Amino acid sequence: MEWTIENEEIAQNIALEAEVLYMCHCDCYNDYRKKSLMFLFPTIMISSIIGGLGFSESFTSDSTNKFILGGFNIFIAILNSLYKLMNISDSEQQHYLLSRLWYMLYEKIRYELQKHPENREECKTFIQSIVDMKMNLIEKNIIINKETIKKYKHKYKDKVNLPLSLKHLSPIVRYKNKDIIPITPSHSNSIEMVI
């Protein structure tokens, strides 16, 4: 199979989908990161203060103060239990990993399409490898939160008319007549966001 415009458009569409999913997972990662810090900062600060007060004989000599320290320790234990129960840290790490993997797929395609067709990897092998990567990532995909879905659905009005570049990413370009020209889909169909 040779590199044709149709094959380039297949690769481009996969890259555009990867670009959107990269951004969705980045947004989810940032949301979980904020939630994680909301649990971790109070826990660290209160634990440090309680630990310091626990060594103070003048503070711990009064039985009321001992109950106050015990109450704060129970509060910290509850915060830690909620943090683990809500699985915030795992979700944060999974979204981070998936954002990196979707970005790697995007970059692999972008890099290959910038080359002259004669210098590219064999078309059939390349298309098969990116389809396999995409399917593997879809298998690993985790739920993207509703706020992020609403954001992108609102932004693209339920259809993703994917621009060449979203945020800071470079546009995908292919070699054509010794000039590098940005690829624009020849068809007017838009790609539906699969989330």
Image (spheres, helix red, strand yellow):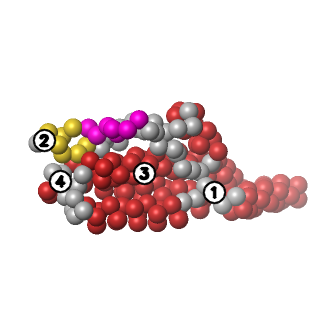
Q: Which residue is mark 2?
A: 177
Q: Which residues are magenta?
A: 182-188
Observer able to see residue 85: yes
Residue lying at 21% horizontally and 38% vertically, measured from the top left = 181
The amino acid on which the numbered mark 3 sits, given as a three-letter code, is: Ala
Label 4 CA crowd tier, 10 Å (few <14, some 14–19, many 20+): some
Q: Which residue is mark 1?
A: 88
Closer to viewer: mark 4 or mark 1: 4
Q: Which residue is mark 4?
A: 117
The amino acid on which the numbered mark 1 sits, given as a three-letter code, is: Ile
Task: Measure how far apart labels 2 and 4 are at the Cα level.
Answer: 11 Å
Q: Earlier in the sequence, mark 2 or mark 4?
A: 4
Q: Earlier in the sequence, mark 1 or mark 2?
A: 1
| Rendered view: 177 above or below 15 | above
Residue lying at 42% horizontally and 55% vertically, measured from the top left = 102
Q: Secondary structure at mark 4?
A: helix
Closer to viewer: mark 4 or mark 3: 4
Residue lying at 37% horizontally and 38% vertically, measured from the top left = 187
Specify whether 41 is left or right of 102: right
Q: Earlier in the sequence, mark 2 or mark 3?
A: 3
The amino acid on which the numbered mark 4 sits, given as a three-letter code, is: Pro
